[in-house]
Amino acid sequence: MEYEYTQGGDLSNQNVVFSQYFLRWYQTFREPRLAPATRNNYLYTLKVIQKYFGTTLLKNITRADYQKFLNFIGKGDSTHPAHAKQTVVKINSHIRACVQNAINDGLIRENFTNNTHIVYDPQHTRGINYLNQAEAIKLLHFLKKNYSGVPPYAMAYLALMTGLRVSEVAGLTWDSIDKKHHTIRVYQSWNFNSKSFAPTKNEFSKRSIDYTPAVGKLFNRVRLEQNNMLMLTKQTNDKNLIFISSRRAEPYSVKVLEQYLKRALKEAHIKQDLTFHGLRHTHASLLLYKGIAIPFISKRLGHKNVNTTINIYLHIIQELQSEESHKTINYLNKLEQLSN
C-alpha cells in the first residue's frame, strides 16, 4: 500500500502537512520493526488522517480540532463509518506517539492530543470472546481425542494451551521446539496474505514459553503423521513447518481454521461463539482467574507491556479486584479480632 504526499514540505521546518509528517515518522520509527498486520494498522491511521485533515499543516492543528477528529472517527457520518473502541484507541495511540515526536523535533510546542477523549460506537464494539473453564475443558477433551490426522484441531489445541496468536502457531517450525526443556521459541510468525514468514507482532512477542507434557505428545504425534503424509504424497516440507496441509504442504488459511474450530465447538456441545483468536483470550482469562501474576501472563502472551494486558482484560481484572477487596477486608477483620 503506497501513499503520496499531499503537499510539499521539509520535515525539518514547521510548514509540514500533518499526514506527511505522520508518514515519515511511521517509515522511520515504526515500520522497520513491525509485523505486516501491525503495519496495516498504522497505514489505516494514515488513511484516516488524510481523509479528515487533508493538507492541514501540523502546526495549525489545535486541541479542539483534534477532539472534533476523534468525534468524527468515533461516530462517523454519511461518508465515513463509525469505529469500535479498540480501533479508536489504536488510532489515538498512533497519533499521540507521532505528535510527541514532533514536539521532540521542535516542530510544535504543545501536544494537541492532551486532555482529549476518545469517542466510539458501542454497537461496533465487541468484548473479547473467550470460554469459561468448563467450556475450555470440554473443548480440550474433544480436540485431544480428535486432533490425530486433523492438523487444524491440533493447532486449536496448541493455541488454547499456550496462548499463541494464530499467526504464531502457523509460523512455528520444528526447530522452534526444545523437547529437553519443554519450551517453544517464538521468533517469527506467518503472513497469511503473502504465504511467507514474517516478523513477530513486536519485539516483545519474541519469547520462549513453557509447554505441558500433553503438548509434547501432540508434537510427537504431528511429527509422525507429517512424515507419513510427506512420504505418501511425495511432497517436501521446505520451510520445516510444524502444521501443514496435505494438499500444498503449507499452513491452513485462517478461514479454514475458523471452520474447523466452529465444527469442534459444535461437536463439543459448546454454544459460545469463538474465533481462533478467542482461544488466546481463553488461555489468558483462565490464567487470570487462577491468580497467575499479570506480569507473567503479559510476558507469556508477548504483549508490549503490562498495560496492554490490563487494557485487554480489564473487565476480568476488575472482577478479580472486587473479589480480592472482599478477601482483604475479611482478613483485616480477622487480624483485628486476633489483636483484642
Image (cartoon, rainbow, N blue to C red):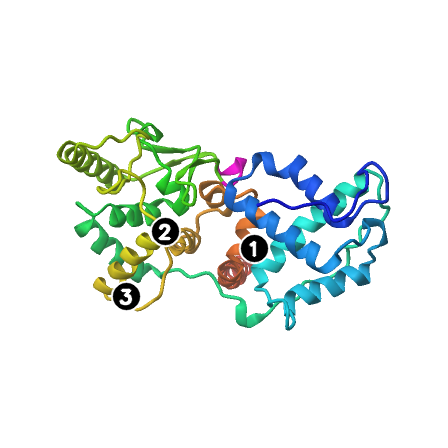
Q: Up-down: is 60 above or below 10?
A: below
Q: Up-down: is 186 above or below 37?
A: above
Res 70 quadrant in image: bottom right
Q: Is 138 on the left or on the right of 47, as rendered?
A: left
Label 2 neighbourhood size at 10 Å, few (<14), some (14-19), many (20+)? some
Number of marks in picture: 3
Q: Up-down: is 242 above or below 119?
A: above
Indicate which disc residue 254 carries: 2
- List x then y, in percent, for residue 18: 76, 49
Q: Is 43 on the left or on the right of 140, as rendered?
A: right
Q: CA distance from mark 1 to mark 2?
A: 25 Å
Residue 164 in sight: no
- The residue sitting at 25% across, 61% down in the picture is 263
Q: CA distance from mark 2 to mark 3?
A: 21 Å
- List x then y, in percent, for residue 102: 78, 42
Give the residue number, with chain letter if any, for mark 1. 311
Q: Mark 3 belongs to which amino acid?
A: Ile
Quadrant location of the C terminus in the rendered image: bottom right
Give the residue number, with chain letter if any, for mark 3. 270
Of 30 and 133, which appears nearest the observer?
30
Residue 86 in sight: yes
Q: Earlier in the sequence, mark 1 or mark 3?
A: 3
- The residue sitting at 65% across, 71% down in the picture is 77
Give the magenta part as a residue range. 201-205
Viewer-side label of 2, 3: 2
Q: Earlier in the sequence, mark 2 or mark 3?
A: 2
Disc 3 is placed on an element classified as: loop
Q: Earlier in the sequence, mark 1 or mark 2?
A: 2
